[in-house]
Image (cartoon, grey):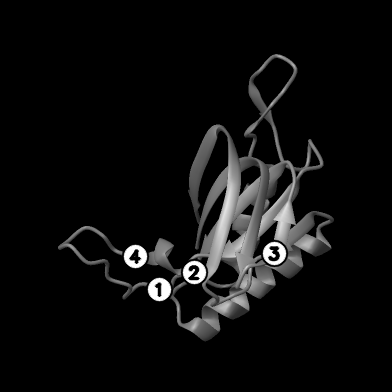
């Protein structure tokens, strides 16, 4: 399971011109599901996303987590993160989870994030989405579990 996280001042996702999810300061996570992923991996990734120290403290060092700053989380499904780009000029998605598996783990990740007390917004699984954000830094990390 992969989570491409971006520290944002704000972010939103639209489907068909309508805003379906929006946050202020926090993390935008683009979530990719692979064939061997399961709830245990989703739990590990959520723990890492919510506790990863990428926000600056009073000394300007990255020492604070999403939880530390009471930030918000925007979760967007991102099928293309599972792409194998090592060969050729076209990505292969042979390692990607099935749509049913990906949807189930995406929904599980979101529900667990909410149950943990985070303020969570989402995109719409499987939809053609437009994501707008102000990447703060810019700060971007690819987290894998």
N-terminal of the pair, mark 3 or mark 4, is 3
The residue pinned by badge 4 equals 83
Q: Residues within 10 Å of mark 1 (few under 14, many from 20)?
A: many
- Identify the residue at the far bottom of this view: 100
The extreme left residue here reads 88
Alpha carbon distance from label 3 to label 2: 24 Å
Label 3 or label 2, whichever comes before in sequence order: 3
Tell me the mark number nearer the camera, choosing from 3 and 4.
3
* Residue at position x 15%, y 63% in the image: 88
Depth check, front residue: 5 or 40: 5
Residue drawn at x 69%, y 48% is 50
What mark, if any, has residue 19 been given in the picture? 3
Q: Mark 3 Cα within 10 Å, few/some/many (few <14, many 20+)?
A: some
Residue on which disc 2 sits: 33
Which of the marked residues, 3 or 1, is nearer the chain's N terminus? 3
C-alpha distance separating marks 3 and 4: 27 Å
- Quick check: marks 1 and 4 in contact, CB under 8 Å? yes
Q: Residue at x 75, y 69 (%)?
A: 111
Cα–Cα span, label 2 and label 4? 10 Å
Distance of mark 3 from mark 1, alpha carbons? 27 Å
Pointer 3 with pointer 2, Cβ within 8 A: no
Q: Is residue 126 above or below residue 57?
A: below
Q: Name the residue located 50 percent from the left edge and 42 percent from the top edge.
A: 141
SS at mark 1? loop
* Contact? badges 3 and 1 (CB < 8 Å): no
* x and y percentages locating residue 101 in the rendered image: 53, 81
Which residue has dot 1 on it? Answer: 96
Decide: few, some or many residues near mark 2? Use Cα within 10 Å; few <14, some 14-19, many ≥20.
many
Task: Give the spatial CA distance, label 1 vs label 4.
Answer: 7 Å
């Amino acid at each position: 399971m992969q989570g491409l996280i971006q520290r944002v001042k704000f972010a939103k996702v639209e489907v068909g011109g309508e805003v379906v999810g929006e946050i202020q300061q926090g993390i935008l996570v683009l979530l990719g599901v692979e064939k061997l992923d399961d709830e245990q991996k989703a739990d590990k990734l959520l723990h890492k996303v919510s506790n990863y120290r990428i926000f600056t403290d009073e000394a300007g060092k990255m020492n604070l987590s999403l939880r530390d700053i009471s930030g918000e989380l925007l979760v967007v499904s991102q099928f293309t993160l599972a792409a194998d780009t090592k060969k050729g000029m076209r990505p292969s998605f042979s390692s990607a989870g099935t749509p049913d598996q990906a949807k189930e783990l995406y929904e599980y990740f979101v529900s667990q994030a909410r149950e943990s007390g985070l303020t969570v917004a989402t995109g719409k699984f499987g939809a053609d989405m437009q994501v707008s954000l102000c990447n703060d830094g810019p700060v971007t990390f690819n987290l894998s579990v």
